[in-house]
Amino acid sequence: MGRGLVLHLCTIALLAAAFFVLPAYHSGNLARIMVLAIYAMGYNLAFGYTGLLSLGHALFFAAGMYGLSLAMTHLAIPALPALGLALVAAGVVAGITGALALRTRGVAFMIVTLMFAQAGYLTALYFSEWTRGEEGFVIPQAMRNIAGIDLSGETGRYFAALFLFAVVLLLIGALVRAPFGRTLIAIRENEARATMLGYDVQRLKWIALVVSGMISGLAGAAYALLFGYAGASFAAVPYSIFPLLYVLLGGAGTTLGPLIGAVFMFYLIDLSSGLTDAYMLVAGVVLVALTLFLPQGILGTLRKRGLPWLP
Amino acid sequence: MASVILQTRGLTKTYAGVTANTDVDFDLPAGQIRALIGPNGAGKSTFVGMLCGRIEATRGTVSFDGQDISHLPAHRRIALGIAYTFQITSVFAGLSVHENVALAARRAGGSAARVADVLNRVGLADRAGQVAGDLSYGHQRILEIGMGLAQNPRLFILDEPTQGLAESEIADFKALITGLKDTTILLIEHNMSVVMETAQYITVLNQGQILAEGTPDQIRADTHVQAAYLGTEDA
């Protein structure tokens, strides 16, 4: 068993143990953080591993969120098949977005993905008869269970989040070690060279974006299912920026960077808002300091300074 | 005569009115080591760029092994058995030397043994674990050549491979190239000792057109070639 896999299993075990040790307030936070970390892991596959700086991942998060919640509330579809629908929705949206946006690169790609996400946000507002726009809607508590497990309760919610987090973490861990993942890294490092080695770079980038979008959609669906709410604010610009921040903080192109970044960012805002009303100022200063002194993020810096095996 | 592995007809590239190559008809027999020489700006890099698909031709055709590849994207041409090394060193700087060669070998269906073999042949085996970007310039050039070898190409296009190499490294390069079996080589080169010692046949490009073709001895004696290089008026 590789050191990377051991580290991943230990992280999962630690998160499982945390539920029994931490006070309810923090384990509640941690459930939310794990879902956000899934989102950031999906984002990291596109940005950290393939080098695709998207500013529109909220579109995929929202596609998953609405895919599940609209199916459950309007079509009375049970949670598990609704989760499958959410994955399909996010995959289709990412596939279409990718087919068009990947014709551009660099700054143009950032702008095109941002515009796609804005179009998605406005679509959610336009159909407010069903989505109830910014105000959003609640998924009936009675529906929020899978195989008899109540996902609205503290324990069910925490371990459902952990289960999904573990699946995605192990999947990404395997993916980036596999030839497919190594090739994505090669594309990030030097796209022209990868092409001249015979790799179909366009197709690989598209696949990476679709997988990334589906993982992001899974996070959106999990958020709706576990916290019982879906709203258009999750499709807005800030939700495209959050995963970028988490990944930059934790370390782009590291498997655990998204989790570390999400924990860091969540508690940075949580703690500083307890100290002052100007909590965003505190968060901002810390972010600037991190960017200045740890430009490769927390795990990226560790990997450079003595832990080269970090996955 | 051996079969022609690469053929161009009327290959032309125009950049916003400026012509880089005009109606180049070029035939490369399988198994040959061919040098492509010419003064700076003669259109050598543009020409090989059109062969491997990095540069889209304005008009004309490229055939590889009897198949018209004029409209294939670069990665499909590479998959047919063409390898290309860049004039400006282009390795995966953030990845290890071993990973660089493995990426090249894997696409061509090469095994781990092939990667080890290539690293030995180019003399980078003891640096396999190093990050490619930390290598000296000369070693990066050699890694670039090694990546091409790992692709096990039928046609190997090298764009100024010895630029910036030390004398001893150039000697190793000559031995490496002349020792390749079953590989046709098209070599852009400025170093005349490399050209004269490795090439069986030479094509001279000047102002985007073929000026002369022949054996090294014929080219050495050609007054037009001397004129193009030396700029004498009487040719």
Image (cartoon, grey):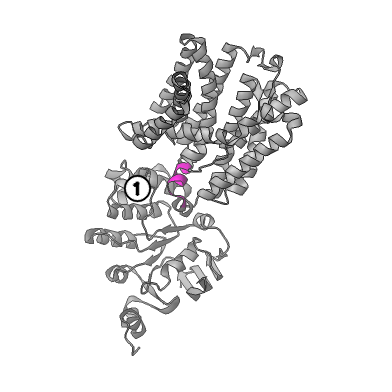
| Front-most of residues A210 and A153 | A153
Q: Residue at x 69, y 20 (%)?
A: A139
Q: Is residue A186 magenta?
A: yes
Q: Give x and y (percent) for residue A70.
A: 72, 27
Q: Residue at x 28, y 55 (%)?
A: B138
Q: Give x and y (percent) for residue A150.
A: 64, 13
Pick the quarter of the image with the C terminus of chain A. Answer: top left
**Chain where mark 1 sits:** B
Amino acid of disc 1? Asp
Q: Residue at x 31, y 58 (%)?
A: B176
Q: Residue at x 45, y 40 (%)?
A: A182
| Front-most of residues A297 and B166 | A297
Q: How many marks?
A: 1
Label 1 SS? helix
Q: Is residue A9 magenta?
A: no
User: Crowding near pointer 1: few (<14 within 10 Å), some, many (20+)?
Assistant: some
| Front-most of residues A287 and B195 | A287
| Front-most of residues A232 and B181 | A232
Question: Main SS of the magenta segment?
Answer: helix
Residue B230, image quadrant: bottom left
Residue to which mark 1 is pinned: B117
Pick the quarter of the image with the N terminus of chain A. Answer: top left
Q: Is residue A233 rendered to the left or right of residue B172?
A: right
Magenta range is A183-191
Q: Is residue B193 rendered to the left or right of residue A208?
A: left
